[in-house]
Amino acid sequence: MITPETDEADFLRRAKGGDQQALAALFARYRDRLRKMIHLRLDRRMSGRIDASDVLQDAYLDVARRFPEYAAAPTVPFYLWLRALTGQRLVDLHRRHLGAQMRDAGQEISLCHGALPAASSASLAQQLLAGLTSPTQAAIRAEMQVRLQEALNSMDPIDREVVVLRHFEELTNVEAAEVLHIEPSAASKRYIRAIRRLKAILDAVPGFFG
């Protein structure tokens, strides 16, 4: 019987043995993290047409089909493999629904080997402003979001991506380095530099800290 306490190694061992329930349980374990990644990176022009659940459903079909290939020669941690397949589904949906308009989205596509759509400054600003709930705060939220988006757009794209991976997607430094194809020490330095830059940006946004 599979329980929530079963560790990933055991899930993987069972899935490699053909246990589809174990594979489904593995995917379910990471569903919320993948959903958050999708929300961050889904182009806002598609938000009314595409739901994160649709992306996850399609991604799981890819996972089920390609798992034997991964199991035979895993080259990255399992979650990063799931994330890559889900990200590819997201890229395919962007191409299908936006086509040539993708070129009008500024830096929507990540510089990191073009693996996933980059999180937009609008998505990041919304995340940063999520705690502003009082009527007074809500009244200035729209103006603050515009200022934040402009400030975030001024950051180096890769530094901004490091912040997304570490702070918003909650990847470890090692996982972020794997995604970016750089050494962990380099990823750590970029993250520290980017967080300092982000703090300076937020300090400069009138009303952000009350």
Image (spheres, rainbow, N blue to C red):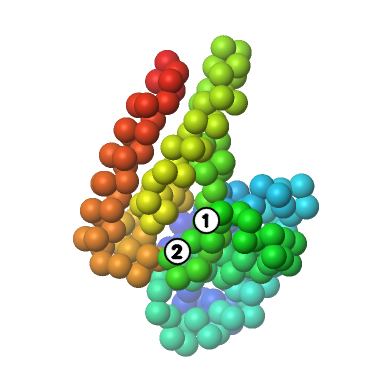
Residue at image x 60%, y 16%? Answer: 139
Q: How many labels sit on residues? A: 2
Mark number for residue 107? 1
Vertical side of 183 occupied by 45: above or below: above
Residue 199 is situated, as x and y percent measured from the top left of the image, at 33, 34
Q: Is residue 165 in view from this perspective? A: no
| Quarter of the figure that contains the C terminus | top left
Residue at image x 35%, y 70%? Answer: 181
| Quarter of the figure that contains the N terminus | bottom right
| SS category of the residue bearing label 1 | loop
Residue at image x 59%, y 77%? Answer: 19
Evaluate if marks 1 and 2 touch, with contact meaning CB atoms under 8 Å apart. Answer: yes
Q: Which residue is the site of mark 2?
A: 111
Residue 200 is situated, as x and y percent measured from the top left of the image, at 32, 33
Q: Is residue 44 in view from this perspective? A: yes
Q: Is residue 15 left or right of residue 51?
A: left
